[in-house]
Image (cartoon, rainbow, N blue to C red):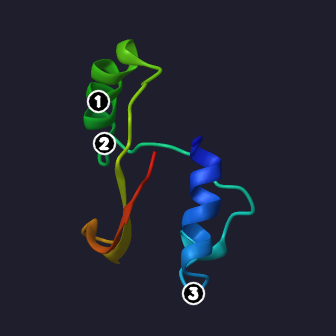
Amino acid sequence: MRGQAFDRRASACDAALPPYEGEFDEIVPHLTVAHGDPEVLAAAAADVEPALPLAATVRAAFLLEEVEPDWGRWVTRRRLELRR
């Protein structure tokens, strides 16, 4: 299943928890590999970019909720098992 199809199905599981609080009409699948100051981001980009694009088999996904935005603290709200 491609990323956008997965996002639509995952969103449909719980309409009370739309991705990004419903702020965006279209969700672009992504993977966050770094968060922080420009030096951290540059180092992460240098490490990751040579390996792009990624190909992987995903067996589960997690619905995360940011509970402390200033500290970047997230909690897992739901684990979504994926079938082949």
Crowding near pointer 2: few (<14 within 10 Å), some, many (20+)? few
Separation (CA) of disc 2 from disc 3 = 28 Å
The mark that comes first in sequence, 2 or 3, is 3
Residue type at mark 1: give it.
Ala
Separation (CA) of disc 1 from disc 3 = 34 Å
Residue at point 25% right, 36% down?
40
- Between residue 6 and residue 48, name the one nearer to us: 6
Which image quadrant is residue 15 in?
Answer: bottom right
Query: In this rendering, would 14 be left or right of 32?
Result: right
Query: Of circles 1 and 3, which is in front?
Result: 3
Residue type at mark 2: give it.
Ala
Tell me the residue that label 2 is attached to: 34
- Between residue 82 and residue 21, name the one nearer to us: 82
| Whole-percent x, y for residue 6 in the image | 57, 53
Q: Secondary structure at mark 1?
A: helix
Tell me the residue that label 1 is attached to: 44
Residue at point 27% right, 20% down?
47
Which image quadrant is residue 19 in?
Answer: bottom right
Tell me the residue that label 3 is attached to: 16
Residue type at mark 3: give it.
Ala
Q: Secondary structure at mark 2?
A: loop
| Whole-percent x, y for residue 3 in the image | 57, 44
